[in-house]
Image: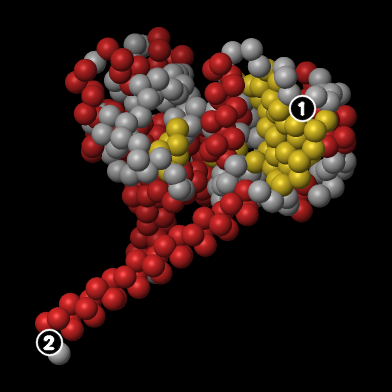
């Protein structure tokens, strides 16, 4: 075969591959569009109700939903935060939802609603809470989520004495992997990728099987393919913020870290997840009063304990007996997440892989 024929052959193959890839992308985009537009829309009470089509929403009409919502009181509140109040909405004995109400009146609240819709509208993942619909009206917005019957990880670990429940090690390990899987999906598999920016134990919800679900996307940032930087707006919760974040706007030296491809911001999620792992391991809040009084922090104290190879002194006393090697390995993963230098922290995909391999390695060594 002569050179012209070889060249023509390669050009033809490349052309066919290019056309095929475009067709595949077009099909995927169309399927995504169809999925996002499989909704019920209704204009009621001066607002617009949108319910994503699913078996869970078939029994819920706009009128029923709003009638029940207008009767919600303080007794129905199950959570609150900077971007809204969350209520338990019971339709009947078998159907309940979590409804987040965001009152209008500030641009920040409206942006929180928009960010949550943008982030959650197309996500279906076992470790991320599912958005079922929303209602927007002149004075308030509502977001409708699946209700998580076991509340939040924060409630389990740090709730009132009367409400506090003991979590055994296998359940904590399961929660850690589930939360890591959800965050990894946001960082690596979503299109566009999503940076949560407020990972903490109160934003990790637990379903009836104690499966972790990442929630609350009011601060989330969508990383579009052509986006070259991320906002300098400081987001997150004290105790979970990576070192230096709170002074970002004052320190030019952080420019390269936070303004390249958004990786540094993703690494802030990794750091925050490391703090959540510490909570699972120690049973202590990152802002525990005992540390504040001593001028220290949970992260600083645990790092010193791990450096001295005395991890057993940091383990939650309510755990009782637990597999020592497994726990020490999780401490190791946690310390990687809590590296002060962002470039030294693993990605969430790497964190998930390390956590999954701990159990596998222990099982193989015992067999």
Give the mark toward the camera: 2 or 1.
2
What residue sits 63% from the left and 44% below the top?
A: 130
Callout 1: helix, strand or loop? strand
Drawn side of residue 83 relative to residue 173, left or right: right
Q: Nearer the viewer, residue 273 or 87?
A: 87
What residue sits 24% from the left and 80% below the top?
A: 9
Residue furthest to the front: 4
Q: Position of residue 243 (x, y in %)?
A: 30, 23
Q: CA distance from mark 2 to mark 1?
A: 70 Å
The total of numbered circles placed on residues is: 2
Quarter of the image that includes the C terminus: bottom left
Which label sits on residue 2?
A: 2
Q: Position of residue 100 (x, y in %)?
A: 68, 28
Residue 28 visible, this orientation: yes
Image quadrant where residue 205 sits: top right
Q: Nearer the viewer, residue 250 or 213?
A: 250
Callout 2: helix, strand or loop? loop
Image quadrant where residue 313 sits: top left
What residue sits 60% from the left and 27% below the top?
A: 113
Q: Position of residue 207 (x, y in %)?
A: 65, 44
Which label sits on residue 47?
A: 1
Which label sits on residue 281?
A: none
Q: Earlier in the sequence, mark 2 or mark 1?
A: 2
Drawn side of residue 351 relative to residue 117, left or right: left
Q: Identify the image's colour scheme: rainbow, by chain, secondary structure or one colour.
A: secondary structure
């Amino acid at each position: 075969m002569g050179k012209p024929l070889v060249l023509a052959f390669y050009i033809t193959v490349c052309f066919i591959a290019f056309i095929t890839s475009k067709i595949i992308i077009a099909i995927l985009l169309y399927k995504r569009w169809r999925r996002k537009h499989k909704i019920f829309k209704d204009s009621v009470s001066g607002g617009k109700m949108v319910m994503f089509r699913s078996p869970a929403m078939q029994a819920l009409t706009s009128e029923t939903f709003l009638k029940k919502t207008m009767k919600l009181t303080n007794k129905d509140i199950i959570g609150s935060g900077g971007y809204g109040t969350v209520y338990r909405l019971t339709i009947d004995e078998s159907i309940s939802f979590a409804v987040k109400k965001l009152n209008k009146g500030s641009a920040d609240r409206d942006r929180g609603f928009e960010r949550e819709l943008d982030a959650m509208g197309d996500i279906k993942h076992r470790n991320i809470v599912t958005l079922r619909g929303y209602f927007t009206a002149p004075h308030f917005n509502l977001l409708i989520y699946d209700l998580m019957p076991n509340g939040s990880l924060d409630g389990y670990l740090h709730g009132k004495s009367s409400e506090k429940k003991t979590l055994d090690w296998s359940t904590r390990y399961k929660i850690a992997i589930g939360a890591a899987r959800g965050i990894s999906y946001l960082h690596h598999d979503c299109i566009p990728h999503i940076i949560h920016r407020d990972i903490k134990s109160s934003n990790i919800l637990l379903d009836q099987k104690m499966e972790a679900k990442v929630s609350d996307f009011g601060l989330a940032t969508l990383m579009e393919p052509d986006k070259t930087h991320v906002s300098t707006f400081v987001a997150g919760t004290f105790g979970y913020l990576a070192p230096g974040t709170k002074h970002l706007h004052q320190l030019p030296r952080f420019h390269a870290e936070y303004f390249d491809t958004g990786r540094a911001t993703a690494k802030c999620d990794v750091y925050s997840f490391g703090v959540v792992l510490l909570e699972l391991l120690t049973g202590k809040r990152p802002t525990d009063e005992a540390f504040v009084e001593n001028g220290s922090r949970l992260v600083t104290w645990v790092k010193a304990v791990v450096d001295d190879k005395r991890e057993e002194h940091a383990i939650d006393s309510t755990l009782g007996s637990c597999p020592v090697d497994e726990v020490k390995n999780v401490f190791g993963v946690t310390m990687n997440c809590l590296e002060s230098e962002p470039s030294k922290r693993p990605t969430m995909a790497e964190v998930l892989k390390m956590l999954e391999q701990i159990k596998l390695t222990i099982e193989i060594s015992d067999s």
